[in-house]
Amino acid sequence: MNQADLLSNRSKSWLELQRLTNGQGRHGKGLTAQDYMELGQLYRQACADAARARSAGVDEVTLAYLDTLLARSHHLFYQAPPAAPGAFRHLLQVRFPQAVRANARLFAAANLVFYGPFFFGLLVPLLLPGFASALLGADQVEQFRDMYSKINDEGRTLGSGSAAVSYYIQHNITIAFEVFACGIFAGLGSLFMLSYQGLVLGTVHGLLIADGKGMNLLTFVCGHGPWELTAIVLAGLGGMRMGLAWVDTQGRTRMGSLRAARQDIAAIILGAAAMLTIAATLEGLWSPSQAPPWAKWLMSIVQIACVIGYLARSGLSRNLRSGLDVSPRRP
Amino acid sequence: MAALDTTTRIQAPELLAFDFELAGPWRRAWAYGLDLILRGGAFAGAVIVLLTVTQWFSSYEDLVQTHEAFMLLLWFALEWGYHVLFEWLWGGRTPGKKVLHLRVLKTGGYPIGLQEAVLRNLLRAADLLPALVPGSVFTVPSYLTGTLVSAVDPLFRRLGDHVADTMVICDRPRPLPWPREVVPPIAAAERLGLPQRPQLSLSERQVLAAFCHRWHEIGEGRRDEIALEFATLLADRWSCLLPASPARFLQVAYQQWLDGQSALSNGPQGPRTAHSAGPP
């Protein structure tokens, strides 16, 4: 077949295909089932046309036209599967805890990276009173003192409570995402940001303890800390996993190594975000409430048990690692 | 196509490879800017509505504080959720990408899912570094890291694309390059001296086709300038007279070749190839 033949015989069905890829069906606006049937046929025919055109030495302009047409219909023909219902629940219930357990040693390391500087920051202000203002700046120190010394006394109304929840969601999850994203730099960004967050948090605690208001702050933090601190460490874990995949390729190419770790990385950071949403809700509504301290501490112990139980046990019964996507396995 | 072209070849299951046109940083920056404006507009609109509504109920203090909550959540959702949700649910496109005909695909050429959308957009936090005006409430992204990384990648992938194994392509629909109108119509006199069925090599055909398809993109004087050398060569070969406009001569020659081809397959004695009945 020569060029003139190809163009005159086939251009009609190319135009038909073009109309379908623009989302215009034969009847009305959207594509009907019949349109999709037709799409498959037209697409495969156009594929054959393109192959023949190439071998017949058809000009580049026509080839570029066919390539674009094929690219557009290829996308329509091989659409991503729709998100299965329950995909997100499956992620939180099975994939996330499984991913954490699969990286248990790295998780332990991430905890060390966070809590090491945390306890360092906790102790130093007790010994060196100037340390906190040197690290955080005098203004910030005053602000923290002011904010946290009477944090349990005021309680929250619906309005201020929801504002606080939103603030904590926005602020904390943004930090977690940044801790995670910086892990792409061979994991160093996550290491730095995680330890820095630990240091700052520890220093604030040390500062208040040195002031004699320590119990006040701790009673506040214990109300949501188990979720929040664990989630920040988990965001760091996601970033470190990503950086490690880049560095320690286990015989794969760097891209291949990243590709192999991608499932775990995505599950971990999404799970961390979900945990931070729980933490923010508690931090905005429960932690500053006027509940008696013993209730808050009791609740804190329950939360610790929940977090440990969740990460250690959830998804155990479904030992099979899930397939390629976030969609749940169908029975 | 040539290695210098900004395309990537995809192997389709139909035993066929075809080329995707890649989107470079410049086009993507425009799409990002457009999305930024849309996000800003959506936020501003929501704030105005919220402020108006809370004005009506200003005696309820709780409600007034709730609007702050809404605004913060909206800000957060627009900052992190906008790109993820659109790219996930809208076939790899945000509104800005749709306007510029860009699309995010897996590097294998297939549509992305939630996982790819999440990873490539969370990694924005690394791609946008270093932030300009650090310490201000609104970080102003420079996207220097992402630009540098994508500049050295043959698929223009930024860090987020590397992690999610995605790429951004441009699939602006092209008009059917056929039938190509020849203005003014070719007179019989212009074909005088040309062979009935000109013989052209593949590369000669390619040159002629490219030239004729870009006819209107090139200025008139420049057209003749470009055409002169090739037109002289063809005129010598066919020992015909080169007309005043070499560009026009090439146009006519190409048409003559095309007509010769149709005559070849439609003529009574012309051999028809086995496949001309159309694909199975």
Image (spheres, coloured by chain):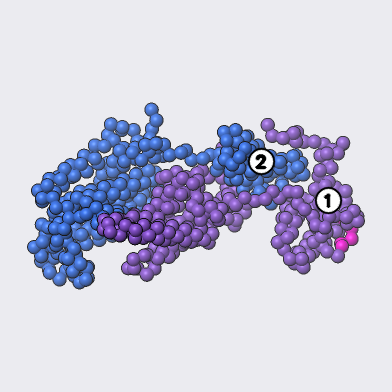
Q: State the residue in front, A264 or A326.
A: A326
- Relative height, residue A128 to residue B275 (above, below): below
Chain ID, mark 1 = B
Mark 1 element type: helix
Q: List x then y, in percent, for residue A50.
A: 66, 42
Q: List x then y, in percent, for residue B203.
A: 73, 52
Mark 2 element type: helix
User: Which residues are drawn in magenta?
Assistant: B238-243
Residue B201 bears which disc, if any? none
- Relative height, residue A111 to residue B25 (above, below): above
- Relative height, residue B27 to residue A101 (above, below): below
Image quadrant where residue B47 sits: bottom left
Q: List x then y, in percent, for residue B172.
A: 60, 52
Report the amino acid beneath label 2: Glu
Q: Residue at x 56, y 45 (%)?
A: B10
Q: Which residue is mark 1?
A: B256
Say whether residue B26 is visible.
yes
Chain ID, mark 2 = A
Looking at the image, residue A88 sits to the left or right of residue A66; the answer is left
Chain A painted colour: blue
Image quadrant where residue B80 sits: bottom left
Marks 2 and 1 share the same chain: no
Looking at the image, residue A47 sits to the left or right of residue A58; the answer is left
The C terminus of chain B: image quadrant: top right
Q: Nearer the viewer, mark 2 or mark 1?
A: 2
Q: Which residue is mark 2?
A: A16
Residue B242 magenta: yes
Q: Residue at x 83, y 55 (%)?
A: B185
Report the amino acid beneath label 1: Gln
Chain B painted colour: purple
